[in-house]
Image: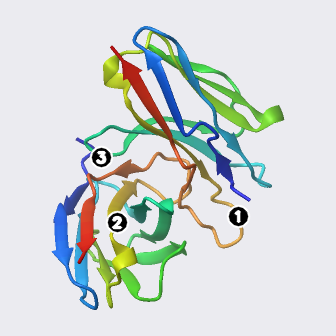
Amino acid sequence: DSGVTQTPKHLITATGQRVTLRCSPRSGDLSVYWYQQSLDQGLQFLIQYYNGEERAKGNILERFSAQQFPDLHSELNLSSLELGDSALYFCASSPRADGNQPQHFGDGTRLSIL
Amino acid sequence: AQKVTQAQTEISVVEKEDVTLDCVYETRDTTYYLFWYKQPPSGELVFLIRRNSFDEQNEISGRYSWNFQKSTSSFNFTITASQVVDSAVYFCALSEPYSGGGADGLTFGKGTHLIIQP
């Protein structure tokens, strides 16, 4: 158990819809990362938050957004969903934001777009 | 160009054989971090090891060992006396926190699917 909690584990929805994925980091970790894992793109970094502020952006689409709340949990919002958004979405956390600490991953949310 | 290359898409060995997973990375930074993660069939990502760019000492943890060579930009992972439970996809990843933009996210290789046959 990594200590990172992601909900829901599975999500099935239709094209054009909007969903919210939730992540609770490990106790004491201030930095939260979101990743997407798909068959064609592999594991891709989407976005990072540190202590409530956006820290870095990766390959995140404009239809996607995220935020980190005062209690440090984070949400990833995906809108105008397309078939290609079907993927496993991981959240990870680390104590700081200097790249020196390992990121511990949650079990992921599997999103299926029908 | 890929920043992290895992040229071996799939490796299949018989239990108790030794196996080495290759990882070649590309960066212009002098300070960077390298990681290995394991993704078993259940799907979670499990952290295995972190290495910073200034520490070229090899590391051994039980049956696992890692060989970091800056001269060849490689960070290879060896499993000795493999077991069926080692079957998983293994990812090598790079962090370049001091690059422009301060991106702290990991850049992953495509992964190597390791199959250990009984």
Q: Give the residue type at disc 1.
A: Ser
Reading the image, the residue beneath label 2 is A87
* Dot 1 alpha-carbon crowd within 10 angstroms: few under 14, some 14 to 19, many 20 or more: some
Reading the image, the residue beneath label 1 is B99
Q: Give the residue type at disc 3.
A: Gly
Which residue is at 37% across, 18% downward? B117
Q: Residue B83 at x, y = what percent?
A: 36, 15
* Separation (CA) of disc 3 from disc 2: 12 Å
Which disc number belongs to residue B57? none
Query: From this viewpoint, which residue is outermost toward the right?
Result: B71
Nearer to me, A41 or A30: A41
Dot 3: what SS? loop
Q: Chain of mark 1?
A: B
Which marked residue is nearer to the observer: mark 1 or mark 2? 2
Reading the image, the residue beneath label 3 is B43
Nearer to me, A34 or B11: B11
Which residue is at 53% across, 61% downward? B105
Mark 3 / mark 1, whichever is N-terminal: 3
Q: Chain of mark 2?
A: A
Which residue is at 23% across, 79% downward? A20
Q: Is residue B50 left or right of residue B44?
A: right
Nearer to me, B73 or B117: B117
* Dot 3 alpha-carbon crowd within 10 angstroms: few under 14, some 14 to 19, many 20 or more: few
Residue A24 in sight here: no
Q: Is residue B55 above or below residue B101?
A: above
